[in-house]
Image (tube, rainbow, N blue to C red):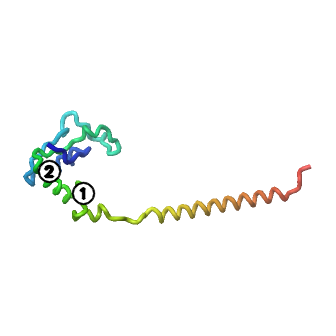
Amino acid sequence: MRQIFSSQRVETVEGVAELLRSHGIEVKVTNGRSYKTRRRGQFSYTDLGNTQGYPAVWIVRADDQPRARDILRDARLLDTTRRDHPTAEFAFRDTPDAGSGGRSWAWRIRIALLVVIAGVALVIGLRHRGGPAPA
């Protein structure tokens, strides 16, 4: 048996298992529903917890694994590492750094604020310097 998919949500794992079963692949779900399942208002994706305890889908026969991986890739539930796959265009596209435009505006605003603060400090300093000395 080989693990092919895991998620914190039991519903997601059950959906993947049904998808694979509908394609004739024998699977087993581990850490599925039980009376110990802690759900309702206590679920959080940010709480990683014990990843070994997540519900998981396992392929029973190793010969079915390549076909199962293809099915999950086509459903975009599994990332690909192959460059010849149709969805690889999105996975391996070299994107321009979108954050640089916002970053340059932030730097311009910071520099402008520093110039304004320096100007105000200069004006205050010149006003106090030119006054008569106290007697």
Question: Percent position (x, y) of residue 24?
Answer: 7, 52
Residue at figure coordinates x 48%, y 65% from the top left: 101
Q: Residue furthest top?
A: 36
Question: Percent position (x, y) of residue 10?
Answer: 21, 44
Could you say which disc has been placed on residue 92 in the image?
none
Could you say which disc has been placed on residue 65 in the image?
2
Amino acid type, residue under disc 2 in the picture: Gln
Could you say which disc has been placed on residue 80 in the image?
1
Q: Is residue 21 above or below residue 85?
A: above
Front residue of 49/120: it is 49
Nearer-N-terminus badge (2/1): 2
Question: Percent position (x, y) of residue 27?
Answer: 12, 46
Q: Residue furthest left?
A: 24
Q: Looking at the image, do the residues carrying marks 2 and 1 touch, with CB atoms under 8 Å apart?
A: no
| Left or right: 80 in relation to 96 | left
| Left or right: 91 in relation to 75 | right
Q: Residues within 10 Å of mark 1 (few under 14, many from 20)?
A: some
Amino acid type, residue under disc 1 in the picture: Thr
Judged from the image, the secondary structure of the residue bearing numbered disc 1 is loop
